[in-house]
């Protein structure tokens, strides 16, 4: 019987190897489901507002049958422009239940990964750099969730009324 330590059981501790990256993708998917529980019902743009915290911005870039790509970021209003950071593009594979950062800007450093493009002999460095950015997403998601951020679909007033009338009709 194997006994897991708290470090092994409670956090992503495998490191920047392929299996660790896959575990991180799974954990990011779980975190995103907590942050965005109804992604299919969410519109193209949404903002999560929590008192005393930065507003978290969501922008849908692409929605397909098995995947979605969206952006998560904060907006910092500067003198003459709005700086977005971290600015992460995230691809969710709904059928596989994993999520990965495909590009992003963190602390003004830009990262982009071209799928399928691997220079011979550089795969370990690609895994390492993907692991770092996806590890950032993992920590950021946990931070946002602890602050109380969550994206909920907005329902038109008519839908809420019909939903409530259905609930109250059951009581008669």
Image: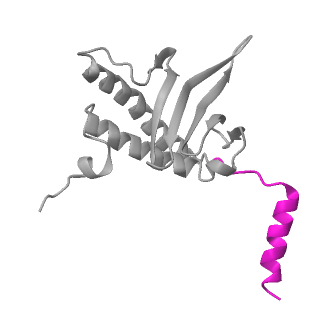
* Residue reaching furthest to the left: 1
Q: Position of residue 167 (x, y in %)?
A: 78, 76
Q: Position of residue 161 (x, y in %)?
A: 86, 66
The foreground one among 78 and 35 is 35
The quadrant where residue 119 appears? top left
Q: Which residues are magenta?
A: 151-172
Q: Residue at x 40, y 41 (%)?
A: 25
* Residue reaching furthest to the top: 80
Point out the image quarter for the C terminus: bottom right
Task: Tell me if residue 19 comes above or below residue 114 in the rendering.
Answer: below
- Judging from the image, the colouring scheme is one colour
The quadrant where residue 14 appears? top left
Task: Tell me if residue 1 comes above or below residue 7 in the rendering.
Answer: below
Residue 29 in magenta stretch: no
Q: Residue at x 71, y 39 (%)?
A: 46
Point out the image quarter for the N terminus: bottom left
Disc tally is: 0
Task: Tell me if residue 139 comes above or below residue 26 in the rendering.
Answer: above
Q: Position of residue 73 (x, y in %)?
A: 60, 30
Q: Residue at x 13, y 58 (%)?
A: 2
Q: Residue at x 32, y 45 (%)?
A: 11
Q: Position of residue 108 (x, y in %)?
A: 52, 15
Is 68 left, or right, of 168 in this rendering?
Answer: left
Is 8 left, or right, of 140 in this rendering?
Answer: left
The foreground one among 79 and 57 is 57
Residue 170 in magenta stretch: yes
Is 105 left, or right, of 46 in this rendering?
Answer: left
């Amino acid at each position: 019987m194997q006994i897991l330590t708290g470090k092994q059981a409670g956090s992503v501790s495998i490191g920047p190897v392929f299996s660790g990256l896959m575990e991180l993708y799974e954990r990011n998917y779980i975190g995103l489901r907590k942050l965005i529980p109804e992604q299919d019902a969410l519109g193209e743009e949404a903002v999560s507002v929590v008192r005393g915290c930065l507003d978290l911005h969501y922008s849908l870039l692409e929605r397909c049958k098995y995947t979605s790509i969206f952006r998560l970021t904060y907006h910092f209003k500067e003198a003459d422009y709005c700086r977005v950071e971290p600015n992460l593009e995230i691809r969710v594979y709904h059928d596989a239940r994993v999520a990965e950062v495909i590009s992003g800007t963190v602390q003004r450093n830009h990262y982009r990964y071209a799928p399928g493009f691997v220079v011979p002999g550089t795969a370990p460095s690609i895994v390492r750099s993907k692991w770092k950015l996806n590890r950032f997403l993992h920590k950021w998601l946990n931070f946002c969730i602890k602050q109380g951020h969550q994206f909920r679909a907005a329902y038109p007033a008519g839908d809420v009324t019909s939903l409530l009338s259905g609930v109250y009709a059951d009581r008669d």
